Image: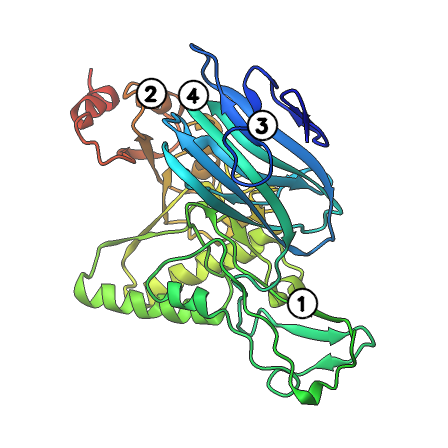
Amino acid sequence: DHTGDAFRGWRFQDDPGAGTFADTRVVHGGRSSLRVENRPGVRGVNRRVAVRLTVRPWHQYHASVWIRTDSFETPETVRLFAIGGDPGRTLNFQDLGVKATQDWTRHHVIINSLDAEEIMLYAGVWGAGGGRLWMDDLVIDEAPLVNVVRRPGCPLVVRCDDGRELEEGVHFRPVRDERMHELADRGDFEVYHDPPVIEFLPAAALADGAIVRASFHHAVSIYSGQVAASLSEPEVFAWFEHQVEGVARILAPRRWFLSHDEIRVANWSAPEIAAGRTAGDVLAANVARCAGIVRARQPEAGLCVWSDMFDPHHNARDAFYLVNGTLAGSWEGLPRDLLVINWNSGKPAESTRFFADRGHEQVLAGFYDGPVDAIREWLRASRDHAVAGVMYTTWRDDYSRLEAFADAAWGQ
């Protein structure tokens, strides 16, 4: 429902009648949709709606919205997410994958409420450009067992309200998300699909109307399909050891680049929680073990790693994405002779000093398709902090500015 262009029942709506509109002509379902459209010359402004909702803590929710676009210039800034808990924490980070021009398409996110009893659900555009976008039929509901993880460290517990625990294979059929495994076999991941259901067997002896509750672990993706591996599951290290063996046999590299970087979900498995360790402790143990596996195969091999997950001035901190607990202390797992590839240009002096004080030589990973001259200031800020070199780093495979970057770094 709406009055003019202002929708009723929402906590807020950006610029009704000026940037957001109630459209009764273009709809997916019902009588009206939300249209986002800037006036000529207006760019980079937020066009959002938000609503406050009561939720149950530690429950899995599925939210979806139908979206249509017409020459919309900033489809990558369209979002649907929730904030909840105390202090307010963003509870999901999935990209919607909206296109500049598309017919009505349903877009999905998965939200775990964590410890929140209330959330603010946001939908809209952060920095809208030209063109038009419509949203309609936004819904949110509980959706248990989407991308349910089944391994020893992630138990599934099914219990009746009378306290009786049901046994898998005896009281209900084995539970497995076949769609998730089908996609994983080809290295893919899906934010949402129809989840598996718990099929009870006669031995469960459930009375009509009996309430049964399930406790489980599920995977989530960050942005465009980033799914984190466990930092402590033994099978992960078995796979890592197998890969190290193959790479060593075929390439015998003089230096190994460990891929620990932007780990945005961690420390949620039952053994990790039971151990009472911080996420920083778990990551420190992980990187130390990975380094040990490489060194066991090639004792003289050099090692390097990206800086961010071990830098207290970057990502080794509290409240990092969906990591459970602080990442402080993760740096304790780094061998002293490991080369740090430092990409913290935001706090160059603090970051390079931190690693230098711990005995690490560093390479500054600069450029990132930005101004080439920035590396000069970074080197100046880090001149006393054991910097061995710089690396030309590009997201776009654009090496046309490599020479200019080198001149900025080392030229007179």
Q: Amino acid at mark 3?
A: Arg
- Could you say where residue 69 lies in the image, as x and y percent from the top left? 42, 32
What residue appears at the point 58 percent right and 41 percent down from the top-left corner? 137
Q: Residue at x 36, y 33 (%)?
A: 101
Of labels 2 and 1, the one closer to you = 1
For label 3, the SS is strand
- Crowding at label 3, few (<14), some or many (≥20) Cα neighbours within 10 Å? many
Q: Which residue is mark 4?
A: 129
Alpha carbon separation for disc pair 3 and 4: 13 Å
State which quadrant residue 190 falls in: bottom left
Q: Which mark is residue 9?
A: none
Visible residue check, residue 113: yes
Nearer to the camera, 101 or 252: 101
Query: Where is residue 265 shown, x and y percent of the image?
Result: 53, 52
Q: Nearer the viewer, mark 4 or mark 2?
A: 4
Please tell me how crowded label 1 is: few (under 14), some (14-19), or many (20+) other residues with Cα within 10 Å.
some
Query: Which residue bears the numbered disc 2?
Result: 374
Amino acid type at circle 2 is Ala
Q: Distance of mark 3 from mark 2, alpha carbons?
A: 35 Å
Residue pointed to by mark 1: 215
Amino acid identity at mark 1:
Ser
Q: Is residue 52 left or right of residue 392?
A: right
